[in-house]
Image: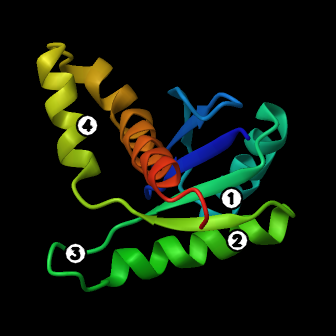
Amino acid sequence: MKIMAVDFGDARTGLAACDRLEMLASPIGVIHETDPDQTARQVAFAAAEYGVGEIVVGLPINMNGTQGERAEKCKQFADMIRSYTSLPVRMWDERSTTVSAHNMLNETNTRGKKRKSVIDEVAATIILNSYLDYRKNHPNE
């Protein structure tokens, strides 16, 4: 099944999707929008366009396991997506994904404007890879 991951942000929201075999997660774009409702509409549209069967939204859990204000915003955003699509929308722990994305971009020496333009979709790809790994290791869930 094709799955799409979303790294929700206040100004930029990264998207990634995998192939039908759930082997390869790839960045598919960034939504440049500050209105969460409009962003949710665009996510639902992208999900339909890419033919995905599930949407995974990153949930920024604190390192101590608690959920703060940002996590609540992401949950509300996931609810908005649900109002625009009949697809299942799952929350997924995104701890350290932005740090990992920065590290990956450091390795490829991606800097400046190019870095800013891709960091969110790289983070979405990391979220999706984490979710796909979980699905492989927990096939009955």
Marks 2/4: CA–CA distance? 26 Å
Amino acid type indicated by mark 3: Asn
Q: Classify mark 4: residues with Cα within 10 Å, few (<14), some (14-19) or many (20+).
A: many
Mark count: 4
Which residue sits at x=26%, y=61%?
95
The answer to whether mark 4 and mark 1 are in CB contact below 8 A is no
The answer to whether mark 2 and mark 3 are in CB contact below 8 A is no
Marks 2/1: CA–CA distance? 6 Å
Task: Name the mark on residue 80.
Answer: 2
| Front residue of this view, candidates 70 and 23 | 23
Which residue sits at x=76%, y=69%?
82
Amino acid type indicated by mark 2: Met
Marks 3/4: CA–CA distance? 17 Å
Task: Name the mark on residue 62.
Answer: 3
Marks 2/3: CA–CA distance? 23 Å
Which residue sits at x=73%, y=41%?
1
Marks 3/1: CA–CA distance? 24 Å
In the rendered image, the vertical position of residue 65 relative to residue 94, given as above or below: below
Q: Classify mark 1: residues with Cα within 10 Å, few (<14), some (14-19) or many (20+).
A: many
Q: Which residue is mark 4?
A: 101
The spot of residue 67 in percent (x, y) is 31, 84
Q: Classify mark 3: residues with Cα within 10 Å, few (<14), some (14-19) or many (20+).
A: some
